[in-house]
Amino acid sequence: MSALLTELHSELPAEVITTDPDVMGGFAHDQAPWAEHGLPAAVVRPLTAQQVQATVLACLRTGTAIVPRGAGSGLSGGANALTGCVVISLDRMDRILEVDPLERLAVVQPGVVNDALRAAAAAHGLWYPPDPASSAWSTLGGNVATNAGGVCCVKYGVTGDYVLGLQVATGTGALVRLGRRTAKGVAGLDLTALMVGSEGTLGVITEVTVRLRPARAAERTVAGFFPSLVAAGRAVAAVAAAGITPSALELVDRRCLDAVDAWKNTGISSEAEALLLGRTDASGLEGEHEASTIVLCFEQAGATFAVQTSDPDEADALFAARRLALPALQRLGPVLTEDVCVPKAQLATMLALVGRAAERHDTTIATIAHAGDGNLHPLLLLRPGDPGATQRAQAAFDEIMAGALELGGTVTGEHGIGLLKRHGLRMELDPAVLEMQRAVKVALDPRGLLNPGKVLDG
């Protein structure tokens, strides 16, 4: 331990190193309940890529594990500390280095908050689409590390679709640039794409270059209230079958609406079991047609009420309720967030499966979903004072993962594997594929010090 601290202090300014146990406790874990974590030996909050590299080199010399961290908003334990590790918290590397309107790209440090980039792009008439529910506080480095999605991804794709290039401190201590700034480029293997979604196990991201899009037309919003989650799932399939690709199609169940209303007094809680929110950003007559088609699909699938709202404040309030659902439920107690994704045609079946899992394991499960692309977030609530609640919820969690795989889906759509879903990864991938991934890990992190125990390990 003393050797590690000597190395760090010899290479870094004292003000970027924290060893106070009370302070380090705030950097020891993300937002995933149940995922184990330890107390780091030190937290380094670098200001430059060179300080990140120096930290990695110090850890290599002392054989110390490294856990990269963004805002700590993850939900799978991917940023959880190991006892005696060094946490590299990138939250202070928060500068937007460049916005290039001609090339439609931005270069940012990893600690830049998602919404800050979106605001900077908007000032140039541009738009950065990926918008996870945590966009007001999650960082671009963390978004890249988990390949985060969001509300807009049904039409515009996920973080990885916008990452052009990266600067990365590797597991050998090198500081390298990957990718490009040009519209096209096929020089060698796509190592940038390899880093996206790697959850800090292949390198520490120190800079991100992302593609931007032109600002889009104002959206039209459709709200539909449904008597069951299964009916809402049928509506999602109907929208897809009608040939509509909405700019958002989000599901919020009654438990979530009630929790948000109790917290924020929104007044939008209803007697319906599910709220489906659709949006289209098509302009003119095309936008009118898409909005009216979504309304019709909702009605034909069994909506008790469906309407296109022309009030932007009302529309924003509805989507705010979607974003606030998880924190509203967390006020009631610990919440384990699932993150399965299934083909759209299987969404209704998957929603029914979640309901059966809740009943079978006597666990309260609320559900939100990026329904337009089949990405469900069942939220498993623990009952305070119930000693068996954790075990039952874990059984339901595993059953939901298995059910998603049976329906042709995946155990994680956007939150990553981290610690909580290592078993799920082994369920999903063939042993030969797992070995290929381990080979890549060994090649890029031969000492095994980058976020050990996450994703492939265990």
Image: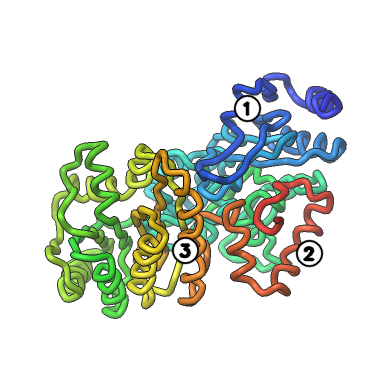
Distance of label 3 from label 1 (alpha carbons): 32 Å
Camera-side residue of 74 and 109:
74
Label 1 to label 2, Cα distance in Å? 33 Å
Q: In this view, does 143 lie above or below 246?
A: above
Residue in view at x 63 percent, y 27 percent: 24
Regarding residue 97, the answer to whether it shows in the image is no
In terms of depth relative to the viewer, which is nearer, 203 or 442? Answer: 442
Residue 434: x, y in percent? 70, 68
Measuring 80% from the left and 37% from the top, which residue is drawn there? 59
Q: Which residue is drawn at 44% across and 54% down?
A: 130
- Helix, strand or loop at mark 3: strand
Relative placement, left or right, of 43 versus 251 is right
Q: Distance between the residues labelled 3 and 2?
A: 26 Å
Amino acid carrying label 1: it is Met
Mark 3 or 2, which is nearer the eye?
Answer: 3
Q: Residue 439 carries which label?
A: 2
Q: Earlier in the sequence, mark 3 or mark 1?
A: 1
Answer left or right for 116 relative to 372: right
Position of residue 441 measured from the top left corner of the image (x, y, whole percent): 75, 58
- Looking at the picture, which amino acid does disc 2 mark? Ala
Q: In this view, does 388 lie above or below 189?
A: above
- For residue 345, side relative to residue 223 (left or right): right
- Mark seen at residue 24: 1
Residue visible at 28% across and 56% down in the picture: 253
Badge 2 element? helix
Which circle marks residue 340 in the picture? 3
